Amino acid sequence: MNRVITFCARAVSLTAALAITATVLIFPRLIALDMHTVPHGWLVLLMFGMSFCYVHGLGFIPENRYLKTIFSPIVAWPTAAFASCMVFC
């Protein structure tokens, strides 16, 4: 049962990371219409959330307890979701 939950969580993380990547690369005008109105701070947070989701989704488990927490879905999903709302809404 635990393996199924872990697999599903990793699948969600990888799907979220791929969706963020595709959206930023294919539709950059959703972020800003010109280079002067890019929300740089929120975009950096979005990239961090995306990276955290990739690390978790690909199955890397760090030995350091702080990094283990950062790369868990408990941190990765809210970071990606909040930053997505701030950038795209």
Image (cartoon, helix red, strand yellow):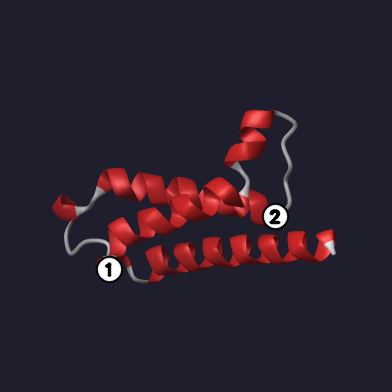
The answer to whether residue 52 of the structure is visible from this angle is: no
Depth order, front residue of 80/22? 80
Q: Quadrant of the C terminus?
A: bottom left
Q: Amino acid at mark 2?
A: Leu
- CA–CA distance in space, label 2 to label 1: 27 Å
Q: Residue at x 83, y 61 (%)?
A: 3
**Mark 2 lies on residue:** 58
Q: Which residue is mark 1?
A: 30
Q: Is residue 2 visible?
A: yes
- Depth check, front residue: 54 or 1: 1
Q: Position of residue 85 (x, y in %)?
A: 33, 61
Dot 1: what SS?
Answer: helix
User: What's the residue at 46%, 63% (across, down)?
Assistant: 20
In front: 54, or 68? 68
Marks 2 and 1: CB-CB under 8 Å? Answer: no
Q: Residue at x 74, y 42 (%)?
A: 61
Tell me where residue 1 appears, x and y as whole percent. Answer: 85, 64
